């Protein structure tokens, strides 16, 4: 029940294309869903986060879509750039928990 | 630049050595965390300190010993490690670990990590 399933494991997108990463969860008590971006040799950095009372959140080229009934959420990267090449982790937690449950990660490569 | 500072960035140690990893934040956060990350895997929670008290220990072997001297500092003492302990050790902080009414934003700030190699 604590798992967050993430797909795909890896993704290759051409520059200017749309990158889409999907996550699904089982625990209906989760109420905070962040996405982290991690470059090689660096720690994860919060990219964007959403709460289940909204269906979409956009920050620049990054958008989270949230489907509460399906227990799924996704990250869309518009106009993908080579600098977006990194590993992306979705995560989830409950409001009273100290523990983030991470997805397995998606390695994104944006080609020229 | 991250506001969570970890030292050293790289550490190589033998199985009989004693070493420490250090973490510092000056954001006024009252929760601090140690995570372990193996290659191509997500971070795994090891310990959580809330208001300088250990609140979560994820069944971590005793060869890892955390210490929180004050609200800005977090140490991880290492002793008699095994080669399989080689990993990236990440420190993180958040405004607070547990809610006491209201909403916990849950935002974790990670450091850049300490890359540990055990020979």
Image (tube, rainbow, N blue to C red):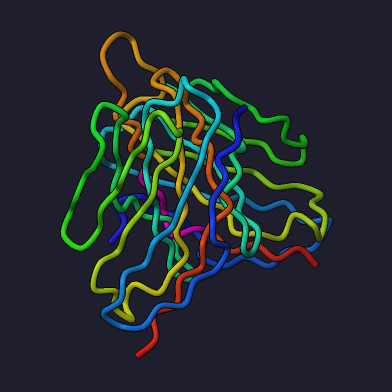
**In the displayed structure, would residue A96 be above or below residue B57?**
above
Q: Quadrant of residue B107?
A: top left
Q: Quadrant of residue B24?
A: top left
* Most foreground residue, B95 or B119: B95
Residue at image location 70% in from the left, 66% down from the top = B117
Using residue A63 as the reference point, say whether residue A21 is left or right of it.
Answer: right
* Most foreground residue, B22 or B4: B4
**In the displayed structure, would residue A33 be above or below residue A80?**
above
* Most foreground residue, A74 or B6: A74
Using residue A10 as the reference point, say whether residue A21 is left or right of it.
Answer: left
Tell me how many marks there are: 0
Residue lying at the far left of the rendered structure: A60
Residue at image location 64% in from the left, 27% down from the top = B57
Instruction: Please state the horizontal and vertical placement of residue A104, each as a whole percent of the image.
Output: 58, 52
Residue at image location 38% in from the left, 49% down from the top = A74
Q: Quadrant of residue B37?
A: bottom right
Provide the residue span drawn in magenta.
B109-113
Specify the principal SS of the magenta part: loop
Q: Quadrant of the N terminus of chain A?
A: top right
Instruction: Please state the horizontal and vertical placement of residue A99, each as a whole percent of the image.
Output: 51, 30
The answer to if B110 sits in the magenta stretch is yes
């Amino acid at each position: 029940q604590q798992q967050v399933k993430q797909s795909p494991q890896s993704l290759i997108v051409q520059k200017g294309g749309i990158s889409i990463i999907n996550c699904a969860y089982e625990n209906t008590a989760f109420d905070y869903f962040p996405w982290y971006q991690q470059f090689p040799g660096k720690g994860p950095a919060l990219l964007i986060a959403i709460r289940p009372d909204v269906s979409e959140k956009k920050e620049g080229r990054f958008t989270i879509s949230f489907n509460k009934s399906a227990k799924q959420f996704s990250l869309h990267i518009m106009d993908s750039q080579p600098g977006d090449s990194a590993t992306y982790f979705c995560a989830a937690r409950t409001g009273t928990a100290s523990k983030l449950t991470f997805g397995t990660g998606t390695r994104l490569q944006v080609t020229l | 630049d991250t506001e969570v500072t970890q030292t050293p960035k790289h550490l190589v140690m033998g199985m009989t050595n004693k070493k420490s990893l250090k973490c510092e934040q000056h954001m006024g956060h009252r929760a601090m965390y140690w995570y372990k990350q193996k290659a191509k895997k997500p971070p795994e929670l090891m310990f959580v300190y809330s208001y300088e008290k250990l609140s979560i220990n994820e069944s971590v072997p005793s060869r890892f010993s955390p210490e929180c001297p004050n609200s800005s500092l977090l140490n991880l003492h290492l002793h008699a490690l095994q080669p399989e302990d080689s990993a990236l050790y990440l420190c993180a902080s958040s405004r607070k670990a547990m809610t006491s009414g209201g909403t916990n934003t849950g935002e974790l700030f990670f450091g850049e990590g300490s890359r540990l190699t055990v020979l």
